[in-house]
Amino acid sequence: MSKQATSTFLFRPVVLWSLLVFGLLLAAMLSTCIGTLSFSPKTVFEILVNNPEVDPIVRQVILDFRIPRVLTALLAGAALATAGLMMQTLFRNPLADPFVLGVNSGASLGVALVVLAVAPFGIQLTEQLNASGQLLLILASSGGAALTLFTVLLLSYKTDVISVLIIGLMISYVVGALVSILIFLSMAERLQSFLSWSFGTYSTVSWTYLRTFATVIVSVLGVSLLLVKPLDALLLGEHYAESVGTRTKRVRVIILVIASVLAGTVTGFCGPIGFLGIAAPHLSRSLFRTSNHRTLIPASILIGGLLSLSADCIAQGPGLDVSLPLNAITALFGAPIIIIALIRQQSLKHTFG
Amino acid sequence: MTTAQTIQHLSTTQLRIGYQSKGREICVAETPELHINAGDFICLLGPNGAGKSTLIRTLAGIQAPLQGTVTLDNQPYESISPRERARKISIVLTETPPLGLLDAYSLVALGRHPHSGQFGTLGQADRNRIDWALQVMDALKFRNSPVAQLSDGERQKLLVARALAQETPLMLLDEPTAFLDLSRRVELMATLRRLVRQEDMGILLSTHDLDLALRFADRIWLLNDDGTLLKGYPEELVTNGAISRTFSTSAFEWDIATETFHIQENSNLSASVHGEGSIALWTRRALGRLGFTVVDETETPALKVRISNAGQQFEWHVDYNGCTKKYSSIEAFIASNSSNIER
């Protein structure tokens, strides 16, 4: 009896992991092939093995645009999902996402300041977003994110964990209000570039930026794997976590910093991308039926990457001339996924109490 | 204990316990020097709000005392790392944590954290200890169930098993019997007491189950409303009146003889019961519940009950207002006399 129990116990995760990896590869392939110009997988393969017979323009499109976009999508999805998972565990709140600390509203204030307020006074920011304009955007949004993060962390050391959640929300509102005022006061043509940033996109991260982007995200994800034990302990609440040897206060700050760096980096490079950070952790819990972070962190990384790639595929709109706003796609598909995962999980109360 | 020298696991100086609020210290209680030794089963008793949970949290190192120090194996708390402390002291708290999608086994396995490595991989020794803890708490049969699907009682067993898996010489439990039915309470207390003897553990347990605590504990710590703490053997605190002083209010009185509470409803109707054994005890209880003050026969009560045993059958002979009535069952006796008091 027990033998059978262990074999079914192992069977499900093995199948799930294989399916996830396969799905991820498939989505990456599709995303590379499909776009305003579509190529066959064979062409992509030939470029990857450096076959000299391929049209150099096609090669350039694939190597300089498609592949960076796919990698960006993967990393961004993984980062947002992991950050979301950590926030949900830390705050014991199913709706917590990487942005609860106001990271994205901080980033949008930074961008709004640069695009709407500073740019009209001489700093040239072209509508096409050339290289230096792109750098300015990244700096502005990362700076804004870092500033809000710093404020929330400073306040968080003084109170309990639920107050941190509320403080983050309130700061988001304040920052959002400032952005509204900026929008209200600015010229229509400037608004356009702010809006296109706020739609979110993976296609503006070139190889140059990708190097920084990937280094930050991969190394921070690596650190997050070291937090498996404290995260598990936090499932029992801070008192029990403390009693099994977790340095709760220190761990709380580390988790907040990690999640904010992940979310802030993604927002800085790709704009605000909603729902992935909530949907991926719920989906991981619901598929693997566990609360154990040794499973959930890798699962969220894969599922986050998969969702992010799929959303990008859809946003690129096979058959359409334009790409749709990524943020709208993640919301359109993310919200139903969350609802389905929650219904399958049956009761939120048991998970988050 | 066989060894002449007892091992003092936890000791404190005189403590002031409480919490900080808006920069002000709010002191809940002041305790004398306290010790928990190997092989001690101590019950912490006290009314609601006397500071039992605060004391347990202070001894567990979750909150610092306002004044005084707690030492664990002769080391003050500040100098012990959380991991080292977690190998010496485990806790079961009143708060039910949100247990999520954890299965029973994973919950108990969390107790191995202070012993496992960076990623919490379980070795053979860890798994043996978890199995042992599940078996001691009689929880093996639901080891693979999701915790969310278990009953309150089963969940409580798991929380104790989790603490046992932590393999600590000391365990502090804050009202572990609160959600359990009577037989499970007795079972839990008996198990803990057995562990104290077998594993030479030191256990401190706070509870509202006065009778269970008095029966099972080696020592009682009695925390009063005024923030003082008395310690002693159970029998000592009962006979010197400390227990009844702590728990008696204007409405209740703790009776040493019957180990129960009397509800004091200043009734001028008195009654006496002449009889023996449990049937007399329950007749007295019934009268007390109906509102009679149960007194001795010599005090000429308004209602006199004599219980006779005719073969297999009990009979209740009641003298009231000069006339005598006879009842052949306790049901008839209670039904008739409840109308007496209503008049």
Image: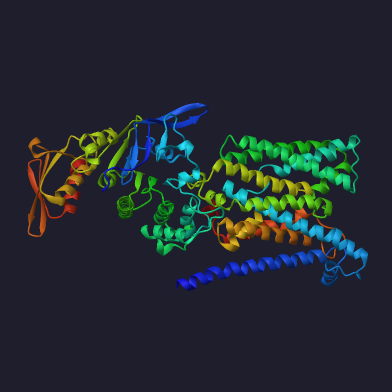
Residue A19: quarter of image: bottom right
Please say whether residue B204 is visible from this viewpoint: yes
Q: Which residue of the protein is positioned furthest toward the top in this rendering?
A: B24
Residue at left 76%, top 64%? A28
Q: Which residue of the protein is positioned furthest toward the front in this rendering?
A: B4
The one of A286 and B117 positioned closer to us in this rendering: B117
The one of B218 and A260 positioned closer to us in this rendering: B218
Marks counted in the figure total 0
Q: Is residue B245 left or right of residue B168?
A: left
Please say whether residue A129 is visible from this viewpoint: no
Residue at left 62%, top 67%? A16
Vertical placement of B266 versus B162: above or below? above
Residue at left 43%, top 63%? B142
Residue B67 percent coordinates (x, y): 43, 29
Q: Is residue B280 left or right of residue A148?
A: left
Quadrant, the N terminus of chain A: bottom left
Q: Is residue A68 left or right of residue A254?
A: right
The one of A232 and B277 positioned closer to us in this rendering: A232
Vertical placement of A276 versus B253: above or below? below
Residue B312: quarter of image: bottom left
Residue B193 percent coordinates (x, y): 30, 50
**Protein image colouring:** rainbow
Residue A163: quarter of image: top right
The one of B251 and A176 positioned closer to us in this rendering: A176
Residue B316 percent coordinates (x, y): 11, 50
Vertical placement of A28 versus A213: above or below? below
